[in-house]
Amino acid sequence: RVEVEESGGGSVQAGGSLTLSCTASLYKNRDNVMGWFVQVPGKEREGVASIYTATGVTYFADSVKGRFTISQDKISRDAAHITVSLQMNSLKPEDTGMYYCATGPPTYGLRQANIALGEIYYKTWGQGTQVTVSS
């Protein structure tokens, strides 16, 4: 059974930084895609950043490029879980929302950026963690 758990989040003033962490079960061959998504009331969930654990390749939404980074922090000793972090810098009020971590087996295609940030390609989701950025 695949599990996903987020931590971090909170409230910060515009221009500040926050770090979100996500621990998820690894698929075989340590080949997952790990993604972060944000949702605000009344809007659809949107992809923010993702990383393919086998290659380290990352993707970012245009709105966060240059401000957010995603990285693989560690793999558990039993190689059953991986932790990734989303470092959010220069935060803006429009970054406010519920942030969800998700994982799934990697999918590859012609429009890889759209696939990497497309929620339909993710199988297991965390409960979400709130990020609030005040002006």
Image (cartoon, grey):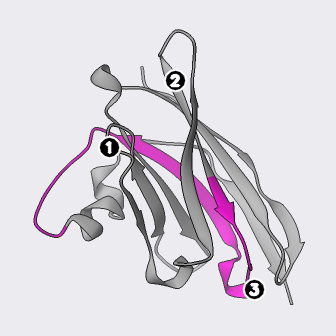
Q: Mark 3 points at which residue?
A: 93
Q: Quadrant of residue 73?
A: top right
- Relative to residue 86, is residue 89 depicted above or below? below
Under circle 2, the secondary element is strand
Q: What residue is drawn where x is 75% and y is 86%?
A: 93
**Label annotation for residue 122:** none
Question: Is residue 21 toward the left or the right of residue 76 in the image?
Answer: right
User: Gap in Å between the C-alphas at discs 1 and 3?
Assistant: 33 Å
Under circle 1, the secondary element is loop
N-terminal of the two: label 2 or label 3? Answer: 2
Q: Residue type at mark 3: give it.
A: Pro
Mark 1 is surrounded, within 10 Å at the Cα level, by few (under 14), some (14 to 19) or many (20 or more) other residues, namely few
Please state the horizontal and vertical placement of residue 120, each as a whole percent of the image: 29, 57
N-terminal of the two: label 1 or label 3? Answer: 1
Q: Mark 2 points at which residue?
A: 81
Q: Quadrant of the N terminus?
A: top left
User: Gap in Å between the C-alphas at discs 2 and 3?
Assistant: 33 Å
Q: Residue type at mark 1: give it.
A: Thr
The answer to whether the residue labelled 1 contacts the one labelled 3, judged by CB atoms less than 8 Å apart, is: no
In the image, the segment drawn in magenta is 86-111
Kindly report which numbered mark, 1 or 3, lies closer to the viewer in this rendering. 1
Kindly give the residue lying farthest to the left in the view shown.
110
Q: Mark 1 points at which residue?
A: 55
- Relative to residue 16, is residue 72 depicted above or below? above
Question: Is residue 50 toward the left or the right of residue 15 in the image?
Answer: left
Mark 2 is surrounded, within 10 Å at the Cα level, by few (under 14), some (14 to 19) or many (20 or more) other residues, namely some
Please state the horizontal and vertical placement of residue 63, each as a whole percent of the image: 52, 84
Mark 3 is surrounded, within 10 Å at the Cα level, by few (under 14), some (14 to 19) or many (20 or more) other residues, namely some
Under circle 3, the secondary element is helix
